[in-house]
Amino acid sequence: MVMLTDAEGSTLQLRDVRKSFPDPGDPVNRRLVLPGISVTLAAGELVSLIGPSGCGKSTLLRLIAGLETPDSGELLIGSEGIRGPSAERGLVFQDPNLFPWLTVRRNIEAGLVARGLLQEKKTEVDEFMRLVDLEAFANAYPHHLSGGMAQRVALARALINHPKVLLLDEPLGALDAFTRMRMQDEVLRLWSARRSTTLLVTHDIDEAIYMSDRIIIMTPRPGAIDQIIPITLDRPRDRSSSDFLRLRSEILELLHFAGNARADNALVAASPSG
Amino acid sequence: MTPRNGEDGTALISPPKPPPVSVAASLRTLSIFAGAVALALVVHLIVSRNEPPLETRFYTIFLGSVLVIAVITAPAQISWPRLRRFRQNLHPILTAAALLLCLWEIITSGVRLLPLPYFPGPAKVLHSLISDRMLLFDSTWHSLVLLLSGYALGVIAGLITGLCIGWSPPVRYWGMPLLKVVGPIPATAWIPLSMVISPSALISAVALIALAVWFPVTMLTASGISNTRASYLDVARTLGAGRGYLIFRVAVPAALPNIFIGLFMGLGASFLTLVVAETVGVKSGLGWYVSWAQGWAEYGKVFAALVIMAAFFSTIMTALFKVRDRMLVWQKGVIKW
């Protein structure tokens, strides 16, 4: 396949990244969301981020995407600091956010059009259409697509820019259980073909174990890194193997022992589904 | 690799096929139409016995030819499905129109229920329409030129100001209050002032129509642009979009449904302003023609001009709908038009 190139990913380094937002109920103090996050992702690594709702996972992703600026701290891609959004950091949301006025094909082309590269890379559009298996729907508009298809388009749209870092903010969260499992394989396939450094925010512990090289567990508000768990299982992984299940119960326990009412919410949110 | 389309089930929604039209049922309804036209013709012949034949001749010919067409197309549609669907669809409306014409003739020329000369019958109106066709055509042409130049100017100005107000917060801060204060003044209220300022009635009419169009287009464009979903802009930014792409390839298409509402509102306002401007200032066009004919108490011509206006304005409206359908084709299936 054409996409099997060397790792396109790049290391992603966060050094003591702090972020607060103005609190609408309190004009004096700002609400601290991230008290200082430090973590490094190796080039081509797939890391999951799990934690209770509102712990700042999405904020962290938006910071890396460049859509927010940190109060202090450094974010580095390779050795370069992040300044504003760029095509080298692709972002996919839970809602595919396809442009409804563009056909599937034109949605996938959007990144090339935005960067004025459509003419040179026209053939790549076909490759990506094939990669996500949507050639038959090239001229369909987004509202004709099912949730899984729309999310595949969103992935292709982000990947066509060959991002060094791919940020996935609960991309499969809105899909039904079967579609979700297929899409997990799909994302893994795309990831192994492209080797973008990938940071995946998820609520689903199984998904995190099934997909990632490492799992970052965050504490409730303000969201600090609680634990980083390496997953060394061989790929493709078996969701019902004893190692898988052992890891799963370990993580559940960790979340539980993180310990208070809010962590219990996290358990509910994590919804063990197997 | 496994095929992955199965999971997603439904594919493209194809438009439903029109139900087959039975030939017999169609024939039946067609004969109802022909009957209505025949009734109108008979009524007309009875009513117009004591009128000058020259004035009613066109209407007789008109009804006669419609009747002939109705009778001929009735069998023709058996072997021509497209004609059948077309006629089937329009049938109730056409029948009602024929009956309405008949009723109009009875009320006016027939029993003289409405005072003459203010309410002429259909025969008289058709006669005026045909006998004064050169002047009517000329007036329509002038109205069209005036309307289109004013409308185009207003739309261009409205899109530009709306875009600036919708996109840029400082422009919004200063522009919005001005828009809210000046915008709601009806364009026609500026007529006295424009007569003093403007060198010619034609220029002031163009400016007034443009002003009438400008306000709704600006307002709706601005609100559409500023309500662009933030996540669309975020996604575009992470795809490497610059300001030009964000404005013209994200915000503008996202605002397009709103912009079209503004264009429709502006079109309505432009019709009104056109007719008023032609009545009081410009010495040409359909508005002028109506007041001129009324001055000579030629009410047949007044009604003829109204008929032309109805056709003229609704054609332009339909044209705008067609443009909308083309540009907003992506909304098909999302919203009900």
Image (spheres, grey):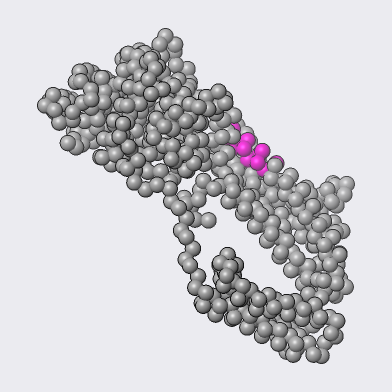
Q: A111 or B9: which is nearer to us?
A: B9
Residue at x 38%, y 15% (from the top left corner): A6
Q: B86 or A255: which is nearer to us?
A: B86
Residue at x 55%, y 27% (from the top left corner): A118
Q: Is residue B158 magenta?
A: yes
Residue at x 35%, y 19% (from the top left corner): A195
**Horizontal and vertical percent for residue B179?**
65, 43
* Quadrant into which the N terminus of chain A falls: top left
The reply to whether residue B6 is visible in this rendering is yes
Q: Is residue B256 left or right of residue B126?
A: left
Q: B164 or B121: which is nearer to us?
A: B121
Task: Relative to B191, say whether B26 is above or below.
Answer: below
Task: Relative to A126, say whether B15 is above or below.
Answer: below
- Quadrant assignment, res B231: top left
**Horizontal and vertical percent for residue B183?**
67, 48
Q: Is residue A196 left or right of residue B292?
A: left
Q: Main secondary structure of the magenta part?
A: helix
Q: Is residue A163 magenta?
A: no
* Quadrant into which the C terminus of chain A falls: top left
**Horizontal and vertical percent for residue B308?**
75, 66
Task: Relative to B116, say whether A22 is above or below.
Answer: above
Residue at x 74%, y 44% (from the top left corner): B153
**Horizontal and vertical percent for residue A138?**
47, 39
How many numbered marks, from 0 up? 0
Q: Which residues are magenta?
A: B157-168
The reply to whether residue A196 is visible in this rendering is no
Residue extending furthest toward the front: B79
